[in-house]
Image (tube, grey):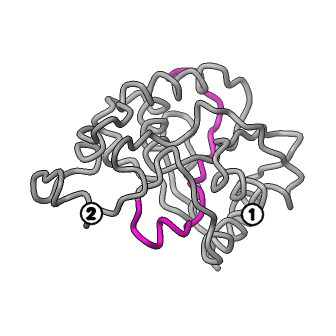
Amino acid sequence: MPGLPELLLLRHGETEWNRAGRFQGASDSPLTDQGRAQAGALTDVLRDLGVAPDRHLALTSPQGRARDTARIALGPLGLEAAEDPRLVEIGMGDWTGLSRREIDPRWPGPKEEPILAFYARCPGGESLATVAVRVGATLAGLAAPTVIVAHGITLRVLCALALGRDLGEAEHLAVPQGSVARIAGGQIALFTSGR
């Protein structure tokens, strides 16, 4: 999307369901100790990138795992993230709370299936196009450098839109837990803590 301000993207820290291999989607589970440590380590990364309340805004998904990550990572910088419901994770429909081991026997897919194809065939789930519409509305309203705290698939879609790429390219635009993706000038770069 042309004319976007600098974006600093954070995926929430590890959760109990991440650790157990369960898909959360629009549901939620709390951060683990590791997830809280990941969020805390991002404070230094953001500080090194010049994040400060007089220069940056912050938005977060309203889901607890993202809100908690935002509070832990941004609080020491004096920045508070406003909740934006358009940043929630993709809805997982019938697969919410299930693990891949529980999904595959009931809804078999091709071997080595790409992650976006897996999400696209989720019964009762949200489509990537729907995620793109809501995330695109968030991006269209940005007028200042912004830190965004959200979720794996939501951030992939956001990256594709922000970079002006096809949604299919979101497959290769992961924002790993414990890192910051910076999008500026049509380029993306990942930063992690030295901790």
Q: Nearer the viewer, residue 94 or 88?
A: 94
How would you rate the neighbour count of disc 1 (Cα within 10 Å): few for under 14, some for 14-19, many for 20 or more? many
- Horizontal side of 69 relative to 171 (left or right) equals right
Residue type indicated by callout 1? Thr
What's the mark number on residue 43?
Answer: 1
**Disc 2 from disc 1: Cα separation:** 36 Å
Question: Magenta stretch containing residue 135, yes or no?
Answer: no
SS category of the residue bearing label 1: helix
Q: Nearer the viewer, residue 98 or 137?
A: 98
What's the mark number on residue 102?
Answer: 2
Residue 41, given in percent of the width and then of the height, sits at: 69, 70
Q: Quadrant of residue 104?
A: bottom left
Residue type indicated by callout 2? Glu
Earlier sequence position, callout 2 versus callout 1 = 1
Residue 45, given in percent of the width and then of the height, sits at: 69, 63
The magenta span reads: 1-22
How would you rate the neighbour count of disc 2 (Cα within 10 Å): few for under 14, some for 14-19, many for 20 or more? few
Q: How many marks?
A: 2
Q: Quarter holding the C terminus?
A: bottom right
What's the residue at 54%, 69% (across, down)?
16
